[in-house]
Image (tube, grey):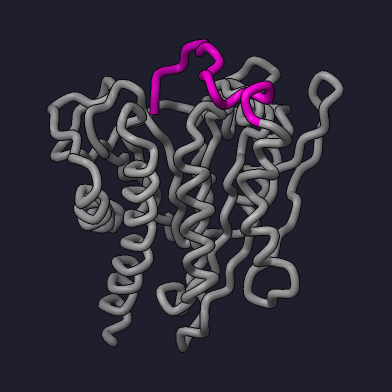
Amino acid sequence: MKRSRLRQRRPGLGPTALPGDPIERLLRPLRGLARGSEELYEKTIAQFSREGMRFEIPRFTLLGPPGGGDPLRIGVFAAIHGDEPEGAMALVDFVRQLAADPEPARGYHIQAYPVCNPSGFVDGTRHSRAGLDLNREFWRGSREPEVSALEGELRSRRFHGIVSLHSDDTADGVYAFARGATITEGLVRPVLAAASRHLPLADGPIIDGFEADRGVLRDCYQGILTNPDELHPAPFEIIFETPQRAPRDLQVAATTAALFSVLDEYRGFMATGDNI
């Protein structure tokens, strides 16, 4: 998660560099799978216009096979910074794999938000087209439609846990912020271990300006995409980061491995808690 600063458009991500709509290109595989499926479906949670162009925020819901109790609700959010497409690509790949083999999602309802900042994604910029870093706007009375829509999801869905996907152009390895429920750090360690099979672990004492312990950070910026304080018990929250200078295919592989690890590890925590 890079510091809040105005960033230049990244070459190769703007609308002049990719023919057609880059969001449609990204989401086309999921939309094809969702047509006619009862386990995977799409809903638009926000529509708005910027500079004469219409944007939408999609949500993909994947219903895993029944797990013998109430489903575990997990939200995964990507591309809140439009110049970090790696997480969006990994999230699409993650959902595609689960649609093909749903067993790892047994007992889960997964809500996937691949493009949380659609105008920034189209422009290839960190900020939205309104000129704001949306990941500093949450729970501050923001009127930005992207923030309002996502806050509504975080309130109404009452997730057991959320994962936010980022890439950091100053990092030399994968790392994660552990927030929310006390079990989060116990989840993060194996998640980073799974990701580190593809990319090295960031292991410095200071990462992104915060104290770090073997790639785990506990402090974070204010105004980030996070659950509302009123949720009890507190959900787990993981902010997962890849080194953006690494090859993109390795970032996608590391992030996908991290997401599968979240499902496996959290299921284990819940089973231990239920004495089963």
Q: Looking at the picture, tell me which residue is in the foreground, 260 or 216.
A: 260
Q: Is residue 209 left or right of residue 165?
A: left
Magenta segment: 1-18
Q: Is residue 62 left or right of residue 218?
A: right
From this viewpoint, which residue is outermost toward the right? 52
On screen, 61 above or below 200?
below
Residue 74 appears at what percent x and percent y? 49, 61
Residue 3 appears at what percent x and percent y? 40, 18
Q: Quarter of the image holding residue 173?
A: top left
* Magenta run includes residue 179: no
* Residue for point 57% across, 59% down: 111
Residue 182 appears at what percent x and percent y? 29, 54
On screen, 64 above or below 47?
below
Q: Looking at the picture, tell me which residue is in the foreground, 239 or 18.
A: 18
Q: Is residue 216 left or right of residue 14?
A: left
* Residue for point 19% across, 53% down: 193
* Residue for point 52% across, 26% down: 83
* Residue for point 82% across, 19% down: 51
SS majority, magenta? loop
Q: Quadrant of the N terminus?
A: top left
Q: Quarter of the image holding residue 167?
A: top left
Q: Quadrant of the C terminus?
A: bottom left
Residue 200 appears at what percent x and percent y? 18, 40
* Magenta run includes residue 11: yes
